[in-house]
Image: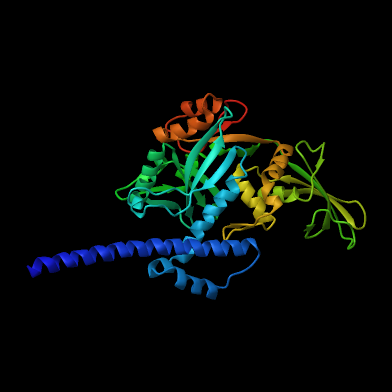
Amino acid sequence: MRLPFLFLWSIINIIIEFLGGKNLMANSIQGARNIFDVLNNARKNNQEISKETLKELSLKLIPDEKIRNRLDGFIKGYSAEELFKEIFSLLPWVKVITPLGQEQFPDVSKEEFQIPDYSVMFEDSQKLSQNILVEVKLVDKKEKLHLQKYKYEVLEKYSKETNTPLIFAIFWKDKLVWTLNSISSFCEKSSEFCISYNQAIENDLSSIFGDYTYIFLNKIYRKSRYSTLKNIKNDYGHEHNSYGKTIYDAISIDDKIYEKIGFFDSPVLDSVFSFHEINHIDISQNEVELKEIVKENIPVKLSTWIILYLEKISFYDKEEIFCHENIVVKEAFNIINNIRVKCGGERFYIIPQIKAKDIDEIFKKQFYKTHVYDCYLENKNYNEKKGICLCWHNNIKKL
C-alpha cells in the first residue's frame, strides 16, 4: 500500500511545483510591469532612475530569474503600449482608448483567455461609435514580427466571447511606423504566425482611426529670412548654420503667394521634407533671404509624421520609446494638419490587399457605404498585385 501512496504524493508535489512555477512567472511579469510604471512616472516628471536602483527593484519585485534577465525587453514592450495610447489618441476619429490592464481573475481564466492591451472606441463614417480590441506589438531591429500560436489563440478566444474584433498594432521602431493588422495579414506556420514590414504596410488598417497617408501633389516652396545680429528678436527658436537666426519663415505652393508660419510650424516642415536652395538674396549687411524647394515629395502617414515632429522638437525619445507630456503633444495633429493644408497635402487611405473575413469586418466598420469601401471591394487580389494601394479621400481615384 505504501507504493501507491508515495506515487500519489509525488504526483501532488509535481502539481504543486507546476502551479507554483506558473504563479512565479505571473508574479514576475506583474513585477516587471510595476517597475515600468515607476520608470515611466519618473520620466514624466523629468527624473532619472539609476541602473543600480532598477537592479535593486528587479531583485525585489521579479522572483523569476528568467523574467528578470528579460526586463529590458519587457520595458520596451510596455513603452510601445504607452506610445500607442499617446499617438493614436491624437488621431481624428479616435474617441476613447481604454487600457484593459494585465491582471485578470480568476487565475485559471488565463489558460483560456488573454485580455488584450486596449479597447478603442472610434467614430465611423456614419458618425456612429464602433469598438475594437487592440494588442500592441513592438518590432525592434527585426524585419518580421513572430507571434506564437498559443498566444494568439487565447486573445482570439477573448475577442470571440466579447464579440469584438481583434487587431494588432505593430510599431516598427526603426522605421517609426505604426501598422494595424488583423491575423489574416500574417503568414501561418506550424507553431506561429509571422508578418514582414512589407506585408504589414500593404494590409495596414490604421486608416479606420483616421491615420491618413498624405501625398503632396504640388511643389512646395519656402522663403526664410535670417539675421546675424546678436540681439535681434527671434520668434522661431532656431537658426541657419550659415545665415544666422531665423526671423521670418513662409511657404507657398505656387512661388507667388507665401503664407507666414510660426514657431511650432517650422519643425513640422523640417521633420518630413528635405529642402534644396534655389537662391539667396542679401537684403542688408546682416540679413539674408533664402528661397528653397522640396527635393522630393514622399508620402507620409499621419502617425509617423506626429512622431517625427515630436522627435524634431525633442518631445519624443526614439531609443527610450517615450513621449513627453506637453500641450504641444496634445495639439500635434492640429499643428501638422494646418501645415498639411498650406502645403496642399491630399489625404489618402491605405486599401488592404488581402481579402479575408476579419479584414472585411474591420474595414467595413469604418467605411461601409463610402467610396473607400467600394475601392476596397474593387481592389485586385493580393496574389495578383503587390504594393500599397491608396484611395483618395475626395473621390474614387486610386494610386
Quarter-of-image position of residue 250? top right
Q: Is 10 located above or below residue 248 in the figure?
A: below
Which of 53/210 is in front?
A: 53
Q: Is residue 27 visible?
A: yes
- What x and y, as percent, mark residue 160? 38, 39
- What x and y, as percent, mark residue 355? 42, 32
Q: Is residue 356 visible?
A: no
In this figure, which colouring scheme has been used for the structure? rainbow
Is 151 placed left or right of 276 in the picture?
left
Q: Is 79 located above or below residue 379 in the figure?
A: below
Q: Residue at x 50, y 37 (%)?
A: 131
Specify the farthest residue to the front. 1
Q: Residue at x 52, y 62 (%)?
A: 36
Q: Residue at x 37, y 51 (%)?
A: 151
Q: Is 53 located above or below residue 289 in the figure?
A: below
Is 217 placed left or right of 192 in the picture?
right
Q: Residue at x 60, y 37 (%)?
A: 93
